[in-house]
Amino acid sequence: MSLMSIRNLSRSFGGVHALRNVSLEVPEGIILGLIGPNGAGKTTLINVISGLIPPSAGSLSFNGRDNGPWPMARSVGYGIARTFQQTRVFMGLTVRENLRIAAEAGHGLNRDVAVDPGLDLAPFYDRVAGELPYGVLRRLGMALALAVGPRMLLLDEPAVGLTSDEIAGMGRAIRRANDSGLTIILVEHNVRFLMEIAQHVAVMDRGQLLFQGSPAECQGNQAVIDVYLGKGQADAEH
Ligand SMILES: Nc1ncnc2c1ncn2[C@@H]1O[C@H](COP(=O)(O)OP(=O)(O)OP(=O)(O)O)[C@@H](O)[C@H]1O
C-alpha cells in the first residue's frame, strides 16, 4: 500500500521548470532511491514533499490524508522528516540539546524510534555542534530527523563528503531505520551506495520522471545510462 501518492506535481522558478508533471507512488516500508543529473529536480521534489516550498500545480497525499494548503502543516506534524545537503543544526547547542529539541518538535509522534540508531553519537552528546567533525555533523543531521519520530524520512545526499568508512556506517544506519518500519526516500549521486540499499529506484531528468524500477532494471536501462549513469556524472562529482 502507498504511504505517499504524488500526483502531477509541477514547480517552476520563473522560466525554469524544475518539476514537470511528476507522479509517483511510494509504498510503505520501502527505501526509494531518487537519482538523476544535476538540475533534474530531485531536491525540488524533496522540498515540495517536505512542505518547504509549494508546488505550482499538482497534489500529494500522505498516510491517507490529502495535503492541505502548502506548507504541509510543518511536515513534521504529518510524520515526514528530512535532512539537508548542508546539515542544519543549532551550532551553538550541544548534540544532546539538539536531539532534545528535535524530539520535542515531533510532539511524541513516535517515541519508540531510537534517537541514535547506530549513529554512534553518544561520545559527542556534550559537545557543541559547531565544533563537531564534518562526518559526525552529518550523522547528527540524520539523528535529528529520526528524533522527531517520522513515518517517512527524506535524505538529501547523506553520503556526500563522507569517508568510505563513514559511508558504510551511514548505510547501516539507513537500513536499520528502514528495518524499524521507516519509509525512506534517498537522493544520492553516489550510485553504488544507493543501488546497494534502495529497493526501488526512480530516475529524474529535466524535471520529469524518466524511469522507475528495481536497482538492476535501472542499471540496465539504456535511457538511464544515456542521461546519467553512462555520463560519469554519478559518483565522479563527489
Ligand atoms: N529556489 C530556486 N530558484 C530558482 N531556480 C531554482 C531554485 N531551486 C531550484 N532551481 C532550479 O531548478 C532546477 C532543479 O534544481 P534541483 O536542485 O531540484 O535539481 P537536483 O536534481 O536536486 O540537482 P543536484 O543533483 O545538482 O542537487 C535547476 O535548474 C535549478 O537551478
Image (spheres, helix red, strand yellow):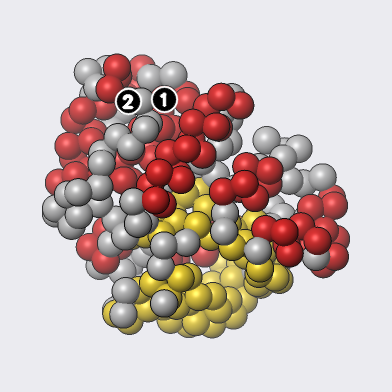
Q: Position of residue 160 (x, y in %)?
A: 58, 36
Q: Could you say whether the residue bearing mark 1 is in a helix, strand or loop? A: helix
The vertical placement of 105 against 87, above or below, is below
Q: Position of residue 43 (x, y in %)?
A: 54, 56
Q: Is residue 65 above or below residue 92?
A: below
Tell me whether circle 2 and circle 1 mark residues in contact (CB < 8 Å).
yes
Residue 86: % across, % down: 47, 38
Q: Residue 213, can we see it?
A: yes
Q: Quadrant of residue 198?
A: bottom right
Say if 186 sits above or below 61 in the image: above
Sequence-wise first label, 2 or 1:
2
Relative to 149, 19 lies left or right = right
Whether disc 1's CB lies below 8 Å from ligand 1 is answered no
Residue at horizontal 31%, vertical 46%?
Answer: 146
- Residue at position x 77%, y 46% in the image: 233
For marks 2 and 1, give the one nearer the viewer: 2
Q: Residue 234 or 122: which is nearer the viewer?
A: 122
Give left or right: position of 90 versus 221: left
Which quadrant does the C terminus fall into? top right
Q: Is mark 2 within 8 Å of ligand 1?
A: no
Question: What residue does disc 1 label?
Answer: 136
In the rendered picture of this protein, how many numbered marks are placed on residues?
Answer: 2
Using the image, tell me which numbered label, if any, was put on residue 72. Answer: none
The three-letter code of the residue at mark 2 reads: Leu
User: Relative to 66, does residue 118 appear above or below in the rendering?
Assistant: above
- Mark 1 is on which residue type? Val
Check the picture and name the quadrant holding the N terminus. bottom left
Secondary element at image label 2: loop
* Circle 1 residues within 10 Å: few <14, some 14–19, many ≥20: some
Which residue does the numbered mark 2 point to in the structure image?
121
Residue at horizontal 29 percent and vertical 56 percent from the top: 150
